[in-house]
Image: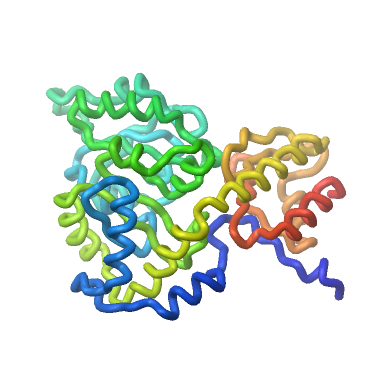
Amino acid sequence: MTLELKMKINLISDTVTKPTPGMMEAMMTAEVGDDVFKEDPSVNELEHKVATMFGMQSALFFPSGTMTNQTAIKLHTQPGEQLICDKYAHVFNYEGGGVSFNSGVSCRLVDGDRGMMTAKQVEAAINPPDFYHSPLSTLVCIENTTNKGGGACWDFKELEKIKSVCDNHQLGYHLDGARLWNALVAKGENALQYGNLFDTISVCLSKGLGCPVGSVLVGSEEMIKKAIRVRKVLGGGMRQAGFLAAAATYALDNQLERLAEDHLKAKEIGVLLSSLPFIKKVESIETNIVIFEIDESFLTSEEFTNKLLQKDIHIISMGQGKLRMVTHLDYTNEMHDRLLSILPTL
């Protein structure tokens, strides 16, 4: 069997990566303690590092991005209230109904563009606070980059306008920044800008940064103190979590700027797909997510994915005829060249 046939290419998500040698070394040499008692020095270091990056008072390490978002929603709301988010939002589509299960809160969905809504749309979605027949609007949730929207990056000026709407109506403002690192690199922005704007921010470490586990919630000291209790209720307390935190600190120091490589590869895939006769549409690509549709007069989406599977190339369906590829740390130049050579032959 040739080397080419042995090469598995997994583009299902940027969560499929393995720790790098440098990350493994950081994990194996980490100083650890019991984080439930806040006595793990590696976790404390990571939390301080991320809080400082965003210019916020405090941070808390979580086992998952979903738990991080769900905790933030719990902090900002009371049962029976309502949050406002785009119809593509991760907190609505991909967190198992946790908004209602964990917080007793409903979602007011806004019909935005690729997961991004405008300040005018947000304001129009706010229920009158003195009209007790409708849920009380108390929170606006933003996702940057937008997963279902194809890794799209928000216009920061629009985020500032939404912040003004939140201030005028006394609404909380939470950022699901699972792939915020990608947006920062793609847009040339910095974490301090976002820390100055949002009340709470969740950032994921196990996507583009390539860590095995973990997300961080940042906010005020008061918010994070409350978040510790919510994390406990949700079962998110970890003991010697410093082994995981050390991987995250290493990634932030060594693997952040390289996200630009993932973005470039995604754009090159998009250019090639756009040139192929059996591709109906490729959505605009800003970061590491490629979403596209097959022209089923040539072949079906299932036939396309099966042809790729025969070559040991793995992608995922987003539903409604949309397919997705996500570039990442373990998607090598050799894999990239192989994918680009195979796609025109399908």
Question: Depth check: 26 or 74 in front?
Answer: 26
- Residue found at x 47% / y 67%: 212
Residue 305 placement, left or right of 148? right
Is residue 73 something one can see in this rendering? no
List x then y, in percent, for residue 189.
Answer: 44, 38
Q: Please name the colour scheme applied to the rendered image.
A: rainbow
Where 32 sits versus 15, above or below?
below
- Residue found at x 38% / y 77%: 30
Residue 315 placement, left or right of 78? right
List x then y, in percent, for residue 133.
Answer: 17, 28
List x then y, in percent, for residue 176.
Answer: 37, 45
List x then y, in percent, for residue 39.
Answer: 22, 74
Question: Depth check: 24 or 226 in front?
Answer: 24
Mark count:
0
Q: Quadrant of residue 191?
A: top left
Q: Quadrant of residue 289?
A: top right
Residue 275 placement, left or right of 168? right
- Residue found at x 58% / y 47%: 260
Is residue 7 something one can see in this rendering? yes
Quadrant holding the N terminus: bottom right
